Amino acid sequence: MQSYVLASVIFVIIYIFIATEKVNKAAIAIFGAVLMIALGIVSQEKAIEEYIDFNTIFFLIGMMIVVGILKESGLFEYLAVKSAKISKGNPIVIMVLLSIITAFFSAFLDNVTTVLLITPVMIYIARKLNINPIPLAITVIFASNIGGTATMIGDPPNILIGSQVKLDFIEFANNLSLISIFILIVTIFIFSLIYKNDLKKSKSNSQLLEGLSEDNLIKDNKLLIKSLFVLFIAILGFIFHSQIHLESATIALFAAALLMILSGFEPVKIFKEVEWETIFFFIGLFVMVGALEETGVIKMLAEKLLSITNGNEIVTAISILWLAAIASAFLDNIPFTATMIPLIKITGEISGMDIYPFWWALALGACLGGNGTSIGASANVVTIGMLKEEGINISFGKYLKIGFPVMLISIIISTIYIVLRYY
């Protein structure tokens, strides 16, 4: 069997296991990577030296440590309860405020971590005010993925694109922040209409608020100040990383090390906050995609894409956007993005097209497309899983009925944006 066929077969089988979640995704990704090396499809030296993107790996580790320490301060719980008090018990206003808070933090922190912190408080508020938590949950899921779209560090697909294509924080902000804010506003408005009957204000809502207090939710004021100070330094570093000639991974690890020193936490405790499953999933994924690139599979796919679009830049950009959106709704957007990056690079080499707009089409499609189904993005799976543990069930079909059409609206807006902005 030729190497490119063998590599394709292994990749597809591993991808099916990842998509169906029949086996732990980190374990199966590492298994696939080792299999590629053991069968001689890609050499061990090349896998480690060329294909594993250590900038992404160490960036994720650094930011996970920072977030792990920040959450100990109680900031997220404070903001969620404070928003409920500001709303004066109006469920629609609570939904809007929770969405804005979620989107904001998802732009600067890992969106999975954001929903891990917001969801328990959201459930608590919904129960305290006797309102349906499902509309709040679905809106928070959308806000986390839309907020993550806005910056280079907000969502794993963007982290991958930024690291492997050498696009900086400023470029992501210039190209994606305003359209993300616009899509967030439209999305919140749509959900306000969809759920207006489920989130009606009653007199009892205001009375029930009396049982909520944010006063004791900030557990450690000194830790909060230190964490926000270090996070601010890190964000400044990401913004000016090209001027100071430091990669995002170096800045993230510096912030992590500094905050561990300032906080006084034992590193052993903090390292437990790192999502090692995600880290090893990325490592396995990089090697498998590298094997596809090594054997020429990516080049063949690029040639196929060009033949379908006839080399038309606008058609190619829109095709990438919609392909990314539909694929990311049903498949994990991380492996899809990792596969598309070398494909787009080779497409540019073959055709000579300006591929700069393609990166923003890919980012918008991969990040926003994840909103389409309950399994489209990690934030969706985590939020719905936490709700299920509390006896609140959002079935695949129930989510699809609401989520997929609203996701399509965001992709239509993105299509118009790509055409008007770049062509």
Image (spheres, rainbow, N blue to C red):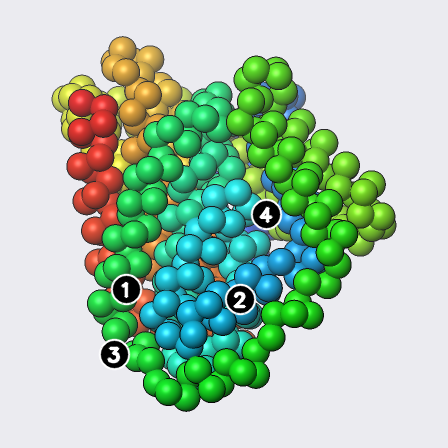
In the image, what residue type sits under mark 3?
Answer: Asn
Instruction: Give the CA separation, mark 2 to mark 4.
Output: 32 Å
Marks 2 and 4, the one that precedes in the sequence? 2
Marks 1 and 4, the one that precedes in the sequence? 1
Q: Residue 5: horizontal and vertical position, in percent?
A: 40, 32
- Mark 2 sits on what residue? 82
Determine if residue 48 is in view. yes
The residue nearer to you, when weighing 412 against 381, is 412
Question: Is there a contact, CB below 8 Å, between mark 2 and mark 4?
Answer: no
Left/right placement of residue 294 relative to residue 312 reads right
Question: Is there a contact, CB below 8 Å, between mark 3 and mark 1?
Answer: no
Instruction: Give the CA separation, mark 3 to mark 4.
Output: 39 Å
- Mark 4 sits on what residue? 278
Mark 3 or 2, closer to the camera = 2
Marks 3 and 4, the one that precedes in the sequence? 3
Mark 1 or 4, closer to the camera = 1
- Mark 3 sits on what residue? 197
Q: Label 2: few (<14), some or many (≥20) within 10 Å? A: some
- Mark 1 sits on what residue? 191
Left/right placement of residue 131 relative to residue 58 reads left
Q: Label 4: few (<14), some or many (≥20) within 10 Å? A: some
In the image, what residue type sits under mark 2?
Answer: Lys
Task: Give the quarter of the figure containing the C terminus.
Answer: top left
Q: Residue 259: horizontal and vertical position, in percent?
A: 75, 41
Q: Residue at x 42, y 77 (%)?
A: 89
